[in-house]
Each structure stands twice: as C-alpha cells, then as structure tokens.
Image (tube, rainbow, N blue to C red):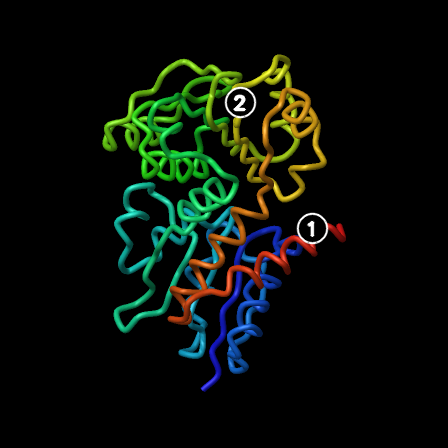
Amino acid sequence: MSARAAVLGKPIDHSLSPLLHQAAYAELGLTDWTYERFEVGEGELAPFLSGRDATWRGFSVTMPVKGDAYAAAATRSPLAERTGAVNTLVRTSGGWAGDNTDVYGVRQALLDAGLDPAAVRDGLPVILGSGATARSALAALTDLGATRVAFVVRDRVRPGTQAQAAADGVSIDGPDVPGAPVVINTVPGTAADDLAELWQVPVRAGQVVLDVRYAADRTPLAAAVAAAGGHLVGGIEMLVHQAAQQVRLMTGHEAPVDAMQAAGRAAMAAR
C-alpha cells in the first residue's frame, strides 16, 4: 500500500517541506512514499483530517493551523505538551499523535553552527519575540543547558512563554544582545529587520544568530549581524533538521540529513 504525507498551512505555496521530504524518500529508496502540500486555513484542519484514508501517514503543520493540530492530536509527546505546540501529526492505531520537531530543528541548527553548550549555560541567550516559535526556541535553549534567557518583545513576554520558562526553571532577564552567546529571531516577516539596530556595536566573539526566516541571509538584519561580527544561521538549517525528525517519526527510517541539506541549500541558492 502506498504511503502519503503532506504539509498543511495557509499560504503554503512557498513551503520547501515537499522538496526536503521528497529528497529523503529518494535517498532512502522509499518509492511508495509521496509528499504533497495542501492549503488548510484556521478552523479547517479537523474536516480535512476526517477525510483522509489510511494511506495518509503523517502531516507537517505550519501556520495558521498549529493550534488546531494541537487540539486534533489524540495523544501528544511530552515536548508538544511542554511547548503547547504541535507541528507534526503521525497516524497511529489510536488516532493522530502530535509532536513538536521545531525544538529539535533549532537545537541541531545551533550545534551545527558550532555553538558551545557551555556558552549557553554560562551566558544569557536572547530570543526575539515570544510567540509559538519562541517557545520552541526556549525549549531548545533549555535543553542545551540555559538557566537564564532574555526576550526582546514589543510589549511583554506572552504568558504562555513565561509559564514555560518558569516550569523549566529558567529565569527571564533583561536582554544584552551584543553580549549574548546566541540570539534566535522568531519574529516573522520584515518586522524583524527593525531590530537590526541591536547589532550596532561589535558582538561577543563566536556569537551565533539563528534567524528562522528562509531568506535570512538577504535581510537588513543579516547585514547588521555580519557587520557586528556575528555568525548568521538561516532558517533553512532549522527547517532541514525539523523535517529530518519528521521523516524519522513518519517513516521509521533514519533521515538522510546530508541529502536533505543539499536539496534545501540548493533551493535557497536558486531563489
């Protein structure tokens, strides 16, 4: 029997998830697996799922239906419960199992960039924004040993993010962007570029800046980070690793990360 998977969200045409998953299937020889994309908006996930037969094995979920995915999951991983976010649904005998692979994606992208966990433990990491993606970033930093985290937000840190930090024993301090060992931008769209002024002075040696946007390297924020001496990591690196974890969960096979990275980086270079 064929096996099918897809990414769901709205808008969805820009998603590189099909490219990454299909690259994994090709490398693994999973010729009976296919991966598609469907435009599914808020409030539309439950009826969409109800119409899928047993050939559908899993879904990657992006905005604006991550909250709907959390509600639709019959069971949730501890990580999904901890962050209050589901970006992955996998079919089980008991219904859809929800997981959050964004945390893994953030952590692995930072480690690939050479971030020293000791610097996270001893320093003060900074997160730009405090929404759902910021909660995944917070969990990744906590898993790397952070006991203090700072947020740069327009108003105040969202209650759910504050609650997650408190549950993990992480204190929330005032931000020091130039002195941070790592900064993670979770602010969507061009609004993040208004924060480029935070990099007007030289930064701590070895600072890693992860910007979750696809084209992070072509933004005013990227230029400011480079001028200040920081090391920018684009969102494609996080996307590859979170997709690799989804491949493991959906297919049961170890993901071919190198092949997925090559496909993702080539796609970004061509854009």
Q: Position of residue 152 (x, y in %)?
A: 48, 20
- Give me the disc on residue 243: none
47 is higher (above) or lower (below) than 139? below
Q: Is residue 225 rendered to the left or right of residue 65?
A: right
- For residue 205, the mark is 2
Residue that mark 1 sits on: 268
Reply above or below: 109 against 192. Answer: below
| Residue at figure coordinates x 34%, y 52% from the top left | 71
Who is closer to the viewer here, 127 or 3? 127
C-beta proximity under 8 Å, tags 2 and 1: no
Q: Residue furthest right?
A: 270
Q: Is residue 96 left or right of residue 199?
A: left
Q: Position of residue 125 (x, y in %)?
A: 42, 25
How packed mark 2 is, by other alpha carbons closer than 10 Å (few <14, some 14-19, many 20 or more), is some
Please tell me whether mark 2 sits on a helix, a strand or a loop: loop
Q: How many marks?
A: 2
- What is the secondary structure assignment of the residue under circle 1? helix
Query: 156 left or right of 165?
Result: right
Name the amino acid type tagged 2.
Ala
Closest to the observer: 206 or 48? Answer: 206
Residue in the image at 51% along x and 78% along y = 30
Q: Nearer the viewer, mark 2 or mark 1?
A: 2
Image coordinates for residue 168, horizontal then vertical, percent: 25, 32
Q: Amino acid at mark 1?
A: Met
Where on the picture, by quarter, is residue 132?
Answer: top left
What quarter of the picture does the N terminus occupy? Answer: bottom left
Front residue of 45/162: it is: 162
Q: Residue at x 60, y 34 (%)?
A: 232
Going from N to C along the chain, the mark reached first, 2 or 1, is: 2
- Where is residue 201 drawn, in percent x and y? 61, 12
Give the residue at the far bottom of this rendering: 1
Q: Marks 2 and 1, Cα distance to the nearest angstrom?
A: 27 Å
